[in-house]
């Protein structure tokens, strides 16, 4: 997955970003507006994110049951492996002493799958957005400093990026999660520690171009401090790039968190879609062909990841008009 | 020019060695952070006192940290990665040596499949630009990149292994058969092995085919716009000849670089697929070693995967600069 960013990064590296006029905030607003006005798929991606954000916020209202508590029948036994009510044999539930109102059935220890799916959106979005912010911030700052100062700072930072490119991504996250407490935040930290490598390289190469522009020289002549030049004059021009890498990072982060949870390195107290799939896999849901358990979490992961890709592509087309034809 | 390239390669090589050294150092520090005591990196609680003493001396674990670090580097150069905890008397190198071929077979076959389909598909999509087929196809390809690999694997397993019972669900072959494989050749010539490889290979290839396909498509469109194609068209060459003989030849070069990078990163990412299909490779060994706190093995597997990635990144860099001299020149400017 990182590889795609590398290859596409090469593509982007060869091209100059379209610069905009006007105040920093206005530039940003216009760039963002253009992305969603121009690109219907990007708009769809935004809707998907909004939808899942609402689900995550209102999870306690939407989910009929607690995602971790086994549901019990009249005798106090766990309702194991109940099929969804629209699939189950009528009357089966009454014979077993419960009312089947499970939209997606129950797990092998009687947990409500639909409720898990609803709560799973929390983990996905939390990981996605926090990793995205971390990646965008680190990548932008590193790219700005390396590009603007050049020389030793540049060499040092870019060699650090080389090191980050040499570290295997998922193995690194697994080791970090295993050595520290298994929590979502360690996964986010580990991802942020590596994923800045793509964005910083591309942002650096754009800063190299921007710092030769006349408005930067003008700022220098008028006596603006270096930090002011970097963060007030140069940064706004490359912020859409940070947005681009941020949205892509949402997608990678959700996908990676799912993989790490699937491998069993997540906090078992936090329900995530990857955890659900691990649970299904280990509980032999595959041999029972329990599609109602296997399919929904994967679809949710796919939808949110695609949303990130769609928005990313939208940014790309606005930033790199030459790619639009392709 | 050729001297420029030689010094560029030498520079890149030195850089790769440095990168590897930093990674190895990080690995050393990381595994000293492992839960329980730092010696746990090498010593299992079930080892006898003598075994413990022997290991302490071998890795200098009774010495201060900086001396341990030097010993660690020397051992690494000698390819001495310690003993695993869980298979008594086996060295980490032995385990990795058994795992690496399986990982390579799976990865290389999948990459071959994915890149053949990707390159041909990319040409077809470029030829069909703007058509309905192209739009549906591109969306499908995007979906395969967004779907978690392990989930695709689970779906294929449910259908082909459990529902239709056409293919085996895990491993590389039953023990009775594996017992007869004395060499790697026996394994490679065994139909049983290939039957076990079908599902993991397809799962991986479904994920991997997206990158070469989208890359080939955009390269084709870029090349098709260039003057020599327009000239060829004016000269009356057939569209088919232009596409395959002229455009595709040029468009395929960056895809080759991507393939080189792909080998490294796929091996690092195979962790998940190997776990789903219980494929006895590097990734699965790493996961199991971390889960069971077999630190020497985890450290060794991590090191080997990182080594492969760094080497492939280096080769990709060199390929890139040889195929496109402009990159070599600008990259040289960056290095110096």
Image (spheres, coloured by chain):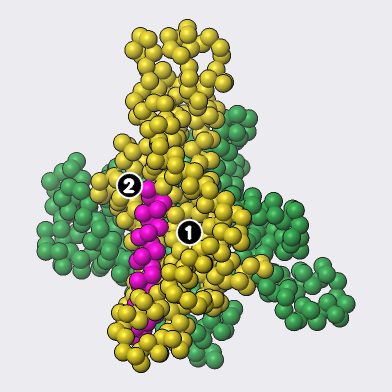
- Colour assigned to chain A in the rendering is yellow
**Badges 1 and 2, same chain:** yes
Disc 2 target residue? A184
On screen, residue B114 versus residue A178, left or right, reads right
Q: Which mark is residue A248?
A: 1
Residue located 80% across and 82% down the image: B231
Residue A173 point in image, percent of width and height:
35, 53
Residue B254 point in image, percent of width and height:
60, 71
Q: How far apart in space, not on screen, are marks 1 and 2 (Cα)?
A: 19 Å
The magenta stretch spans which residues?
Answer: A126-154
Is residue B24 at all visible to an observer of this figure? yes
Which chain: green?
B
Q: Which chain is home to disc 1?
A: A
Q: Give neighbour class at mark 2: few <14, some 14-19, many 20+ (Cα, 10 Å).
A: many
Q: Which chain is home to disc 2?
A: A
Q: Quadrant of the N terminus of chain B?
A: bottom right
Q: Is residue B58 above or below residue A202?
A: above
On screen, residue A248 versus residue B286, left or right, reads right
């Amino acid at each position: 997955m990182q590889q795609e960013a590398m290859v596409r990064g090469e593509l982007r590296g060869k091209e100059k970003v379209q610069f905009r006029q006007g105040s920093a905030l206005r530039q940003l607003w216009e760039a963002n507006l253009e992305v969603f006005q121009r690109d219907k798929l990007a708009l769809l991606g935004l809707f998907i994110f909004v939808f899942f954000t609402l689900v995550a916020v209102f999870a306690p209202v939407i989910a009929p049951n607690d995602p971790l508590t086994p549901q019990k029948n009249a005798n106090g036994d766990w309702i194991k492996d109940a099929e969804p009510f629209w699939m189950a044999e009528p009357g089966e539930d009454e014979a077993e002493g419960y009312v089947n109102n499970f939209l997606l059935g129950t797990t092998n220890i009687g947990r409500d799958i639909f409720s898990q799916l609803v709560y799973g959106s929390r983990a996905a979005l939390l990981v996605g957005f926090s990793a995205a912010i971390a990646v965008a911030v680190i990548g932008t700052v590193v790219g700005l400093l390396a590009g603007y100062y050049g020389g030793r700072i540049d060499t040092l930072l870019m060699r650090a990026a080389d090191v980050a490119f040499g570290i295997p991504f998922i193995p690194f996250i697994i080791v970090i999660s295993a050595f520290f407490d298994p929590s979502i935040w360690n996964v986010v930290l580990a991802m942020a520690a590596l994923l800045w490598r793509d964005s910083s390289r591309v942002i650096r190469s754009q800063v190299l171009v921007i710092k030769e522009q006349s408005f930067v020289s003008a700022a220098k002549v008028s006596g603006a401090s270096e930090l002011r030049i970097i963060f007030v004059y140069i940064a706004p021009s490359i912020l859409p790039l940070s947005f681009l890498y941020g949205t892509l990072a949402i997608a990678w982060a959700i996908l990676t968190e799912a993989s790490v949870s699937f491998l069993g390195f997540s906090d078992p107290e936090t329900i995530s879609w990857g955890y659900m799939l691990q649970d299904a896999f280990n509980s032999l849901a595959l041999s029972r062909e329990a599609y109602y358990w296997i399919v929904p979490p994967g679809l949710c992961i796919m939808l949110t990841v695609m949303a990130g890709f769609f928005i990313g592509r939208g940014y790309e087309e606005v930033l790199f008009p030459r790619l639009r034809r392709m | 020019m050729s001297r420029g390239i030689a010094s560029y390669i030498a520079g890149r090589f030195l850089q790769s060695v440095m990168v590897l050294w930093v990674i190895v150092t990080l690995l050393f520090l990381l595994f000293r952070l492992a839960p329980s005591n730092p010696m746990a990196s090498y010593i299992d609680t079930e080892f006898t006192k003598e075994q413990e003493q022997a290991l302490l001396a071998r890795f200098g674990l009774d010495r201060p940290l900086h001396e341990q670090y030097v010993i660690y580097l020397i051992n690494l150069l000698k390819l001495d990665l310690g003993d695993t905890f869980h298979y008594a008397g086996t060295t980490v190198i032995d385990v990795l040596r058994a795992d690496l071929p399986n990982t390579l077979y799976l990865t290389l076959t999948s990459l071959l499949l994915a890149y053949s389909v990707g390159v041909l598909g990319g040409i077809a999509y470029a030829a069909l630009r703007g058509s309905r087929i192209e739009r549906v196809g591109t969306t499908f390809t995007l979906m395969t990149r967004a779907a978690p690999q392990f989930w695709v694997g689970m779906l294929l397993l449910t259908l082909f292994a459990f529902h239709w019972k056409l293919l085996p669900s895990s491993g590389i072959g039953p023990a009775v058969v594996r017992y007869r494989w004395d060499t790697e050749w026996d394994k490679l010539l065994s139909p049983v092995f290939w039957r076990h490889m079908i599902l993991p290979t397809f799962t991986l290839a479904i994920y991997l085919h997206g990158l070469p396909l989208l890359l080939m498509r955009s390269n084709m469109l870029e090349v098709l716009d260039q003057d020599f194609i327009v000239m060829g068209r004016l000269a009356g060459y057939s569209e088919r000849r232009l596409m395959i003989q002229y455009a595709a030849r040029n468009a395929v070069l960056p895809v080759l670089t991507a393939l080189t990078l792909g080998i490294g990163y796929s091996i690092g990412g195979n962790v998940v697929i190997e776990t789903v299909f219980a494929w006895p490779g590097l990734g699965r060994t790493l996961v199991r070693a971390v889960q069971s706190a077999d630190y020497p093995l985890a450290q060794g597997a991590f090191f080997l995967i990182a080594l492969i990635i760094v080497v492939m990144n280096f080769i990709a860099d060199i390929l890139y600069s040889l195929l496109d001299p402009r990159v070599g020149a600008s990259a040289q400017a960056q290095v110096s």
